[in-house]
Image (cartoon, rainbow, N blue to C red):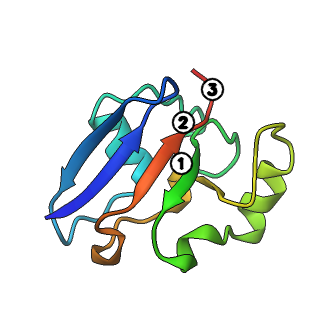
């Protein structure tokens, strides 16, 4: 199992267990786990409503793609550790990571 910790907008942290080998994005996992995340565009990297902050994890997850950067640049609260959950594919090396939900409610 891949274990993640998700922090909501109020600072409450909740662990999530995800089966290894699953072919989903973090956005899909958050929606399936009933986390309050809009993801209006359905994972197409067009809306930035699945904005998350990488709180803790491997360095490669702190580097958004150029498409993400274009959208993140439009958000007033985006930082160097911001990502779009729709662009993060779940993998075994994410075990132990902590994400904070930042997108719109």
Pointer 1 and pointer 2: residues touching (CB < 8 Å)?
Answer: yes
Residue 3 rendering spot, x and y as whole percentages: 23, 59
Q: Residues within 10 Å of mark 3 (few under 14, many from 20)?
A: some
Residue 59 located left or right of residue 7: right
Element type at marker 2?
loop
Spatial distance from mark 1 to mark 2, Cα to Cα?
Answer: 7 Å
Judging by the rendered image, the residue that carries numbered circle 1 is 43
Residue 68 located left or right of residue 54: right
Q: Nearer the viewer, mark 3 or mark 1?
A: 3
**Residue 70 lies in quadrant:** bottom right
Residue 53 rendering spot, x and y as whole percentages: 58, 50
Residue at 34% x, 58% y is 24
Residue at 25% x, 44% y is 15
Residue 83 located left or right of residue 20: right
**Residue 104: assigned label:** 3
Residue at 54% x, 71% y is 61
**Residue 76: assigned label:** none
In this view, 39 is above or below 29: above
Residue 55 rendering spot, x and y as whole percentages: 52, 55
Element type at marker 1?
loop
Q: In front: 20, or 43?
A: 20
Judging by the rendered image, the residue that carries numbered circle 2 is 39
Q: Residues within 10 Å of mark 1 (few under 14, many from 20)?
A: some
């Amino acid at each position: 199992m891949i274990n993640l910790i998700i922090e909501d907008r109020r600072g409450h942290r909740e662990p999530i267990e995800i089966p290894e080998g699953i072919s989903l994005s973090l956005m899909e996992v958050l929606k399936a786990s009933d986390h309050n995340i809009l993801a209006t565009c359905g994972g197409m990297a067009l809306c930035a409503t699945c904005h998350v902050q990488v709180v803790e994890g491997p360095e490669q997850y702190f580097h958004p793609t150029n498409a993400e950067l274009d959208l993140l640049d439009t958000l007033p609260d985006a930082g160097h550790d911001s990502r779009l959950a729709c662009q993060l594919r779940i993998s075994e090396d994410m075990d132990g990571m902590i994400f904070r939900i930042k997108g719109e409610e």
